[in-house]
Image: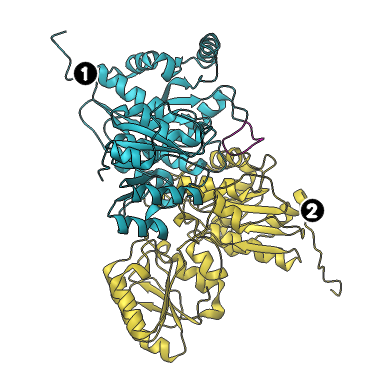
Chain colours: A cyan, B yellow
């Protein structure tokens, strides 16, 4: 699967940041591929990219519309279908990571046939999956886990992978969701596999490694989210992590999609994840906490990180505004990071 | 979906009881529909039913071959494909609950087209599933959970449903696996749904009820099985059980399909299930332990049940050899069973 770039990023009429996290993730992590954005209305969320119609984007060289909006259940709405058809007719390919497949929509399929453009359903899992084995395998793996969905697990995982690579440690980001797959160009749509194969599908994308490097595996959902905890647990068992990083958004009032349901306490969430993870790696440890403090000012963000670090006895940072150096340092203290290709000239 | 009966039950060349649990489950719970059995070899497992070739079964009035054999991953082997084709040509319909669909095999599909017989894939989930809501709903629900796969969860659930009905309590068995679905004629193949929909699919088959009765929900896998724990957790959250019954086979050396991996301690397994279940029902309690003592003599079976009951403070029985009265009594003590249609004439 190779999705032609550059991209036009779709925002629709989304009013909240969480709905556009796929488009934003691509914009943040692949600025080289992100040519512009498309909004249905002027009060929709913006990524700060040039606003373009489908035709204008095609004229400017865009090759693919990334349908980077998400809602609970991954459904493709009527307005989005109209927009996809219009984009195809303007000459763009279309990529999406919804449960509803582009390929399965008759109007979209007909438009793609008519225009000769390509459709990419990145949430379509591979045909040959297997059940998890739970057998210990070589190599080091870090998994991000969360108090909730959409708290920064993908961002944190990508930031950790970059930081390790910058220190000369072999490191691979293993994508498990649609945004991560669009960013990395490969991965496993774990929430879309048949339930029996959750842990096996994660074993498949993070195989044994012998180079002293790390797999940084993107977590999904939360053990405390009643809609998705099964995915989170299978992912945890399949990932067989040596280290976990807990991700959280301070101040979030309720679990994603479930008004009135509060978030778990950080310590309880961490303990539950460690207890479950021990089934496939008895030596698993926590190495840090990553907070999404985007709704706080800088002083409040520093305070909540300091308080969290003190309470949990772990380094705590906002990967977006503070980086992940403290977490990487802790990883080094606990595991001794190997740098086989150290830059001896420096 | 109505599968025409009576059935011929397929055993293939299975040498172990666990592989034929679907065929045995149908034989035990639907003796009225179980006309005979088919074995490839004379040293295969038997259900004690009349041995029949496909042609002889068709002549005797059998309408459908139940491909009631299971292996890890639910794969359809070459020999089974040959047998299915032969059965279709002998005039039988074929029903199966494997991940590999009968409909997806070109040889089988061609034979069905050629002979005009029907194929039933009971592990095919419905097209419209939704994510779980986790919102409290009316009615009482009991879920069976296990230390491992194939320890008697379906048998126990069916026995509890029968026992409640015999006491005049409205009770419905909710099937979540292929055998249960073949026995009940309805249900949800939970291990075959897309991972995001595990808990939602269970909410769907055990909706709110207002008649004072119980849903008896068949559990799957184990929170301690590294291949399938995601399914078990999503099922636990979706079932929102008021009561759980822990199922176990004393003396089993290793987890199903994972030689060398031991089973969890009963108390630890029960505690983990109760802790996870509290996410969607904070008042959940355990009401009993069901042991599969089929490999023990009667005295040893009584001893292990007594010791387990003492250790866990719960009634403990083998539903097959001892019934489930003690567990039903405990359910009554804790919840006060309602009998709206009490037989006043007795």
Q: Relative to B346, does residue B306 appear above or below in the rendering?
A: above
Magenta stretch encompasses residue B183: no
Give whichever of A345, A27 is nearer the camera. A27
Magenta stretch encompasses residue A256: yes
User: Disc 2 designates what residue?
Assistant: B336
Give whichever of A237, B16 is nearer the camera. A237
Residue A143 is drawn in which quadrant? Answer: top left
At 35% from the left edge and 79% from the top edge, which residue is drawn?
B112
Residue A30 is drawn in which quadrant? Answer: top left
Q: Is residue A62 left or right of residue B226?
A: left
Q: Are marks 2 and 1 on the same chain?
A: no
Q: The C terminus of chain B lies in which quarter of the figure? A: bottom right
Residue B186 locus on image (x, y percent): 56, 67
At 49% from the left edge and 22% from the top edge, which residue is drawn?
A292
Residue range in magenta is A254-262
* Chain of the residue that carries numbered disc 1 in the rendered image: A
User: Disc 1 designates what residue?
Assistant: A339
Task: Tell me the mark number nearer the camera, choosing from 2 and 1.
Answer: 1
Residue A95 is drawn in which quadrant? Answer: top left
Magenta: main secondary structure: loop
Residue B161 locus on image (x, y percent): 65, 63
The answer to whether any part of residue B42 appears in the image is no
Q: Which mark is residue B310?
A: none
Q: In terms of secondary structure, where does tag 2 sit?
A: loop
Residue A185 locus on image (x, y percent): 28, 38
Furthest residue toward left: A345
Task: Tell me the crowding category of disc 2: few under 14, some 14 to 19, or many 20 or more residues within 10 angstroms, Cα based.
Answer: few
Residue A79 locus on image (x, y percent): 49, 48
Q: In terms of secondary structure, where does tag 1 sit?
A: loop
Mark 2 → mark 1, Cα distance in angstroms = 65 Å
Q: Is residue B300 left or right of residue A330?
A: right
């Amino acid at each position: 699967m190779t999705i032609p770039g550059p991209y036009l990023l779709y925002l629709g009429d989304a009013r909240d940041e969480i709905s556009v996290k796929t488009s934003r993730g691509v914009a943040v992590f692949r600025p080289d591929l992100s040519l512009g954005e498309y909004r249905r209305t002027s009060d929709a969320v913006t990524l700060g990219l040039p606003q373009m119609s489908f035709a204008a984007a095609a004229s400017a060289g865009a090759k693919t519309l990334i349908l980077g909006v998400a809602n609970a259940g991954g459904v493709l709405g009527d307005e989005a279908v109209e927009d996809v058809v219009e984009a195809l007719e303007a000459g763009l390919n279309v990529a999406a990571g919804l449960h509803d497949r582009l390929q399965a929509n008759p109007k979209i399929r007909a438009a793609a046939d008519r225009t000769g453009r390509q459709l990419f359903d990145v949430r379509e899992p591979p045909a040959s999956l297997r059940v998890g084995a739970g057998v210990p395998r070589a190599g080091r793996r870090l998994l991000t886990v969360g108090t909730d969905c959409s708290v920064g697990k993908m961002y944190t995982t990508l930031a950790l992978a970059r930081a390790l690579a910058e220190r000369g440690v072999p490191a691979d980001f293993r994508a498990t969701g649609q945004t991560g797959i669009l960013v990395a160009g490969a991965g496993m749509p774990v929430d879309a596999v048949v339930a029996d194969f959750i842990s096996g599908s994660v074993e498949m994308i993070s195989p044994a490694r012998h180079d002293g490097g790390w797999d940084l595996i993107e977590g999904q959902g939360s053990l405390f989210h009643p809609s998705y905890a099964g995915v989170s647990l299978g992912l945890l068992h399949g990932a067989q992590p040596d280290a976990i990083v807990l991700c959280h958004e301070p101040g979030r009032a309720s679990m994603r999609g479930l008004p009135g349901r509060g978030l778990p306490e950080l310590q309880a969430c961490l303990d539950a994840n460690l207890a479950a993870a021990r089934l496939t790696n008895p030596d698993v440890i926590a190495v840090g906490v990553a907070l999404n403090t985007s709704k706080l000012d800088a002083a409040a963000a520093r305070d909540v990180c300091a308080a969290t670090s003190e309470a949990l006895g772990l380094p705590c940072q906002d990967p977006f505004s503070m980086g992940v150096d403290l977490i990487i340092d802790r990883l080094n203290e606990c595991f001794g990071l190997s740098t086989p290709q150290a830059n001896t000239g420096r």
